[in-house]
Amino acid sequence: MVKADDRVVHALKSKLNRESKWKRKKNKFGSVRWNKNYELATKQAPSPDKWTSIKQTVKNLVTDNRLNFWREYIKPLVQQGNFLKIIELENLDLTWRSIIYDLPRGVLSFAVRSAIDFLPTFSNLRTWGKRVQTGCKLCGNHETLLHALNNCPLSLNQGRYTWRHNSILKHTLKALTGHENNNILIFSNISGFTTTGGTLPVNVIVSKLKPDIVIQNKQDNSIHLVELTVPFETNISKAHERKQTKYLDLVSDISDNGFTCDLTCFEVGSRGLITQENVGRIVEIFYFVGRAKPSKKFMKQLSKMALLSSYTIWNARQEPAWGSEDQPHISL
């Protein structure tokens, strides 16, 4: 219908009128969309006599409409919705995409199936018609992948999530220490890095809050607080905002005591994803202690540790006993 020749236009109209009577949805969809967007395209195109421009505009509009249709169709579906979210995050994280090719078969299967929420959680088993009850073996709450890896209250109280968190934290501390100058002091709640005030030296401030890492530069009287969180990937942004809010007053109080204080909260997804924003935050932490930019190997190790830890937590999700002291920190 976008030809200059009147005879061609008439022939095309006749064809569309004929095909519009067909019952096949595919042809009806195409002709309806084309007619609807043709009117819009002639308004958007620079000039109605530029048929190439009009055709391209109509084509783009039809493509966009079709994509929007499928996005809206898929969004309410749980498994597919989670898949789209994880793919969006994965596209931002080349590190995660690289480590999945360097894993044992069982861990690789866990990584891929967890990414699309296709693991045999009780919730999925009921959806598949293989189970009636969905209560978690540990706490009795509805068991989903999010629940098993991050939200089970009994797992939290037993220290399972803390064990995963501290494995990543310990590896980060190892990378930060050993090359700092004498003016840099690093404190943490990990054995070997504690101080009298917990993680905050008493000469800086007395507080119940315990940031994961406290870096003190005696030369310029500055304090850098670091907080690590290992959330479910789709909750990374919420976790970051929550930790920023939690330590906002502490930063202000330390500044009132005469120190220059700032805060860096960073997140490593429980299945190993590290977003570009968090890569930048980790670089900032290294810069504060005078270290070079962290290597790709280090970033890969952080991702792998989170994934391996979550794999252990997943495999133990039905075991009532858990002794953190019996679980060595993941080391690579």
Image (cartoon, rainbow, N blue to C red):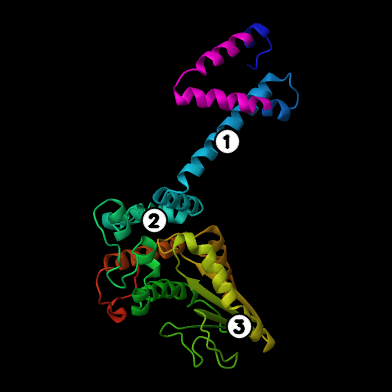
Residue 158: x, y in percent?
Answer: 33, 79
Picture quadrant of residue 149: bottom left
Separation (CA) of disc 2 from disc 3: 37 Å
Residue visible at 59% across and 74% down in the picture: 245
Name the residue nearer the viewer: 87 or 4: 4
The numbered mark at residue 64 is 1
The local crowd at label 1, few if under 14, some if 14 to 19, many if 20 or more residues have their Cα within 10 Å, is few
Q: Which residues are magenta?
A: 10-39
Which residue type carries mark 1? Answer: Asp
Residue 29, magenta (yes or no): yes
> In this rendering, would 220 be left or right of 291?
right
Q: Which residue is mark 2?
A: 99
Q: Is residue 226 above or below residue 31?
A: below
Query: x and y percent of residue 62 in the render?
Result: 58, 30
As drawn, 267 above or below 182: above
Answer with left or right where residue 119 lies relative to residue 170.
left
* Residue position marked by numbered label 3 in the rendering: 250
Residue at 59% from the left image edge and 9% from the top image edge: 11
Viewer-proximal residue among 158 and 24: 24
